[in-house]
Amino acid sequence: MTPYGRWVLLLCLMAGFLIQVGPMALGDVGQVRIQEVEVSVSDHGPVVILKAEQKAIPIFVDFTVAGSIQAALTGNRTARPLSHDLMHTILESLGAQVTQTVITLKDSTFYGALSVSTKDGTKVFDSRSSDSIALAVHFKAPIWVSRELLEKSGKPMGEDPAPRQML
């Protein structure tokens, strides 16, 4: 493994990306691209809402991740870099970038498969959905879900997916 590869691997392990999974080709049949990401606060805490095809998928996250995603969405910077800001800076300085993330649902838990591209190719890493979404937003990379997940977990846009107020 090249020193560059070791840095990228170490970086991903430090961020909690522990299990490598197989890549998904862009536009695979049955995959839906998320069109909008919103961060709100509900009665149950912060929620990231993934929107596509007139449906919204609520994913509850912690306050730090919600703040990181909101800052990336709005272009606002925090006084000090948060973990996702640091990961973004490190990956970019190494010539790597997040190219996409795929969100899945297993046993009521959301998972993320984060694709990171380097000059040596693309690796896909298992991650918390919230971290995967945060890094995808930082890199302006597409977020994908399966049609089945959108149908099963998505709420109609007119229906409030989670009682909330904007952050």
Image: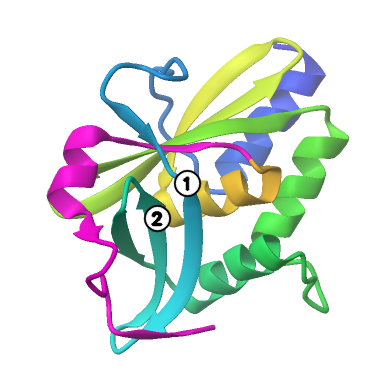
Q: Between 83 and 45, which is closer to the camera in this rendering?
A: 45
Q: In the rendered structure, which segment of residues is drawn in magenta?
A: 141-167
Q: What's the mark number on residue 22? A: none
**CA distance for labels 2 and 1:** 8 Å
Q: Quadrant of the N terminus?
A: top right
Q: Residue furthest right?
A: 93
Considering only order in the chain, which callout, 1 or 2, is on the residue closer to the N terminus? 1
Does residue 151 belong to the magenta stretch? Answer: yes
Q: Position of residue 140 (x, y in %)?
A: 66, 43
Q: How many residues crowd mark 2 within 10 Å: few (<14), some (14–19), many (20+)?
A: many
Q: Residue at x 60, y 74 (%)?
A: 67
Residue that label 2 marks:
50
Q: Nearer the viewer, mark 2 or mark 1?
A: 1
Q: Is residue 53 left or right of residue 63?
A: left
* 106 vs 115: above or below: below
Q: Is residue 58 left or right of residue 144?
A: left
Please tell me in which quadrant of the rendered image residue 22 appears.
Answer: top left
Q: Residue at x 62, y 67 (%)?
A: 68
